[in-house]
Image (spheres, helix red, strand yellow):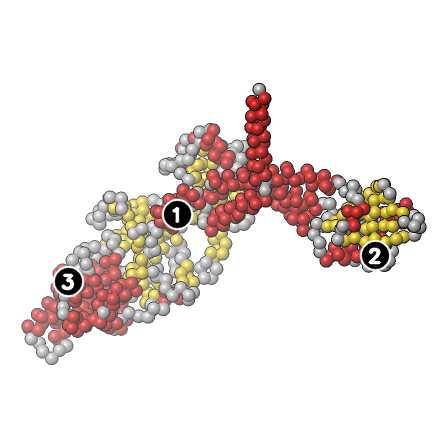
């Protein structure tokens, strides 16, 4: 019996010791600082990395591998990640335990006078002073109470064995600073947890709510994917085209979205956007009408950035703007075959259109439209011209490197020399995807207007194969009518064997008529050389342009390549000129003037034809007109924890102010009869939490005042 009782007692003491050690750890300063450090790191991540974006955005930004890693760590929604909420919970627990352990002692210390001190203890203080006065102890005590009280101290006089003790204190509110500062951390964390997605998770755990992963009309989405009007906290977005309305918000989740029903309907009357002279947007706002579902009352308001509308405890912020389904009209030009035709096409942004029959089994997915594009024209305008002679030198002297540099120059980003900045609005653009019957898609980005690049006006046609890649641009030169019609005519002619033969004959005839000899053999040789050059440049369906020219020249002896390249390029340029004229004649048009401007245009057109091999599209679509429909993206939030956080911030300010600017000071004066029976003997001692020069000065002033050996300190 005795052994069993002892064992049970040991187990109880062990559990008590374990509990005591756990409380000591959780309420320790080092544990709280560690938690605050982790929260600071998480906050930096949440600030640098955009939160709650669509998952494809993160895939495009980080790639598949890091997308999975960051997703496992919950970095795409840091403030609602389980580990962040756990850290917040531990911080609340740690700070609460710290307050529970120390606040009672501090409050007792605030009320305490510490009048149980002894005379000998006062003699051990650093700040002490002893003097003799002719007054009787009672008279001296009464005078000292008045003098010390006049300095703002609260006093208490106690009778002691052999004398009297005057205890005084000032700045006891300093202890409240500690309590307020620690309580502020708890209040702010609770407010943050209240505004987190814990209420939504609670509904998912206990009420069967789940994220919606499919597609469909919002009003037809089942109830299990919707959050009711009594949801205490949420943060979602709603996209509203002009003239339309919405009574729901979309709350992004890790594995889908949830629909938050609102107690009102928001109708977007008009979306306003203003620009600076450079074309950069300087203001965007939404003119809305909010209709209450219960009363039917309508409230008109304008929502601007940083100027939200607060309605029934729900804040409506201007977040961004998108396209609301703009109607587009385009002109399509085939990029394959020898047909020089074009056709009209219509589309709606966020919709799809089937490509006309005969151009392949493709579907056009209209993914974006921009009525304005601000580009750095200084960066794209100063590259120098690319003449035919320069291209011929590149091909001759360094075939592979020269051609690759040339291709990089003409089929790459339209923004170079980013250190120079001349931002201008270059007009509308359209973005779309061409998806084939197997589901594979490439993305295209075409400007509506021509842009001045390298001293010439060109139409930029962008293409990328993966969403995480930058757009590469084909530069189609603008003709005399500021259109792509002449380039398309030349492209179709190059793909037409009959026109290539006609162009070769024209070139040979023109070359012979300008020469001294008119030998039929020479004419035939020139015709065959011109035809071969055009055929090589046109390609075999796999390789074309300057790449095909490069491979042809590499078959020759190295010693002959430079000379052959020079001759080849001269024949090619002349043949292409005749091809252009033959194509115009076929269409019943007059020949163009043989001048420097058209020669420059032809060279740019040849370069674009070479680069077209890197623009794998069955059709080029040029925007001709549009009807813009704007859509406003509003962020709708209900955050009851905001007021709690504000209260915590108030407590934090009061606490920090009290700890930094309120100094606690204690004063004791021991008064006893003098040893010779004449008057009294007094001993002054002072203490403070932080010893400073101000305290040293205050002690000297107090010493002079109470001992009567110096004049009182001057008033402030």
- Tell me: 206 left or right of 597: right
- Residue at far top of view: 1
Tell me the number on the disc at residue 58. 1
Residue 525 shows in the view: yes
Which residue lies under the disc numbered 2? Answer: 704
Asked if the residue at tag 2 contacts the one at tag 1, i.e. Cβ–Cβ closer than 8 Å, the answer is no
Alpha carbon of mark 1 to alpha carbon of mark 2: how far?
72 Å
Q: Could you classify mark 2 by the number of other residues whose Cα lies within 10 Å: few (under 14), some (14-19), or many (20 or more)?
A: some
Q: Residue 265 location in percent, x, y?
A: 49, 38
| Residue 535: mark in rendering | 3
User: In whole angstroms, how far apart are the C-alphas of marks 3 and 2?
Assistant: 111 Å
Q: Nearer the viewer, residue 609 or 6?
A: 6
Disc with the residue nearer the chain's start (3 vs 2): 3
Measuring 34% from the left and 61% from the top, which residue is drawn there? 414
**Where is residue 365 drawn, in percent x and y?**
31, 46
Q: Secondary structure at mark 1?
A: helix
Q: Position of residue 584 (x, y in %)?
A: 20, 64
Residue at the image point whose x is 38% and y is 56% from the top: 428
Q: Residues within 10 Å of mark 1 (few under 14, many from 20)?
A: many
Determine the residue positioned at 75% across, 56% down: 696
The total of numbered circles placed on residues is 3
Q: Nearer the viewer, residue 608 or 91?
A: 91
């Amino acid at each position: 019996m005795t052994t069993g009782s002892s064992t049970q007692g040991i187990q109880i003491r062990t559990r008590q010791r374990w509990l005591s050690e756990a409380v000591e750890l959780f309420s320790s300063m080092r544990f709280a600082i560690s938690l605050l450090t982790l929260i600071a790191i998480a906050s930096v991540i949440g600030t640098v990395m955009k939160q709650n974006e669509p998952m494809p955005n993160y895939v495009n930004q980080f790639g598949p591998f890091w997308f999975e890693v960051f997703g496992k760590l919950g970095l795409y929604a840091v403030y609602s990640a389980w580990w962040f909420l756990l850290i917040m919970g531990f911080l609340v627990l740690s700070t609460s335990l710290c307050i529970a352990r120390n606040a009672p002692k501090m409050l007792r210390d605030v009320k305490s006078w510490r009048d149980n001190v002894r005379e000998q203890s006062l003699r051990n203080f650093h700040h002490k002073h002893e003097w003799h006065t002719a007054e009787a102890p009672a008279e001296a005590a009464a005078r000292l109470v008045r003098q010390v009280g006049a300095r703002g101290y609260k006093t208490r006089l106690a009778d002691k064995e052999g004398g009297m003790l005057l205890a005084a204190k000032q700045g006891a509110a300093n202890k409240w600073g500690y309590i307020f500062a620690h309580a502020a951390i708890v209040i702010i964390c609770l407010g943050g947890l209240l505004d987190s997605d814990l209420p939504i998770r609670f509904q998912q755990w206990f009420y069967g709510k789940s994220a919606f992963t499919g597609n469909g009309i919002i009003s037809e989405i089942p109830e299990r994917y919707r959050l009711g009007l009594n949801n205490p906290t949420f943060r979602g977005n709603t996209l509203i085209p002009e003239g339309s309305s919405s009574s729901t918000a979309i709350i992004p989740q890790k594995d889908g979205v949830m629909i938050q029903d609102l107690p009102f309907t928001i109708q977007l009357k008009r979306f306003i956007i203003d620009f600076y002279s450079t074309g950069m947007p300087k203001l965007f706002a939404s003119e809305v009408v909010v209709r209450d579902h219960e009363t039917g009352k309508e409230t008109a308001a304008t929502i601007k950035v940083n100027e939200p509308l607060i309605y029934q405890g729900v804040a409506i912020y201007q977040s961004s703007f998108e396209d609301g389904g703009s109607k587009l009209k385009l002109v399509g030009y085939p990029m394959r075959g020898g047909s020089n035709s074009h056709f009209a096409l219509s589309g709606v942004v966020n919709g799809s259109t089937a490509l006309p029959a005969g151009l392949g089994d493709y579907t056009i997915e209209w993914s974006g439209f921009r009525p304005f594009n601000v580009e750095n024209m200084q960066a794209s305008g100063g590259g120098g011209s690319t003449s035919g002679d320069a291209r011929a030198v590149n091909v001759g002297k360094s075939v592979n490197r020269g051609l690759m540099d040339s291709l990089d120059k003409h089929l790459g980003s339209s923004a170079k020399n980013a250190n120079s900045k001349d931002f201008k609005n270059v007009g509308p653009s359209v973005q779309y995807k061409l998806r084939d019957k197997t589901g594979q898609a490439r993305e295209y980005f075409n400007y509506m207007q021509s842009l001045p690049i390298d001293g010439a006006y060109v139409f930029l046609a962008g293409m990328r194969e993966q969403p995480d890649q930058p757009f590469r641009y084909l530069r189609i030169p603008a003709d005399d009518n500021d259109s792509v019609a002449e380039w398309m005519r030349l492209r179709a002619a190059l793909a037409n064997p009959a026109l290539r033969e006609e162009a070769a004959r024209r070139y040979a005839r023109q070359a012979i008529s300008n020469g001294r000899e008119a030998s039929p053999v020479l004419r035939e040789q020139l015709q065959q050389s011109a035809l071969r050059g055009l055929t090589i440049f046109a390609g075999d369906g796999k390789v074309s342009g300057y790449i095909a020219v490069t491979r042809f020249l590499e078959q020759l002896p190295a010693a002959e390549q430079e000379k052959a390249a020079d001759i080849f390029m001269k024949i090619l340029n002349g043949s292409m000129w005749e091809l252009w004229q033959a194509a115009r004649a076929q269409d019943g048009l007059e020949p163009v003037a043989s001048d420097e401007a058209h020669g420059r245009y032809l060279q740019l057109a040849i370069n674009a034809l070479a680069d077209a091999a890197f623009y794998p599209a069955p059709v080029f679509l040029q925007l001709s007109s549009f009807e813009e429909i704007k859509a406003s993206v509003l962020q709708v939030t209900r955050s009851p924890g905001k007021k709690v956080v504000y209260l915590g911030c108030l407590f934090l300010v009061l606490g920090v102010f009290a700890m930094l600017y309120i100094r606690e000071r204690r004063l004791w004066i021991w008064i006893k009869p003098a040893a010779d029976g004449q008057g009294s003997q007094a001993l002054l001692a002072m203490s403070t939490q932080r010893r400073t020069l101000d305290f040293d000065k205050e002690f000297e002033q107090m010493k002079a005042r109470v001992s009567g050996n110096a004049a009182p300190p001057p008033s402030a």
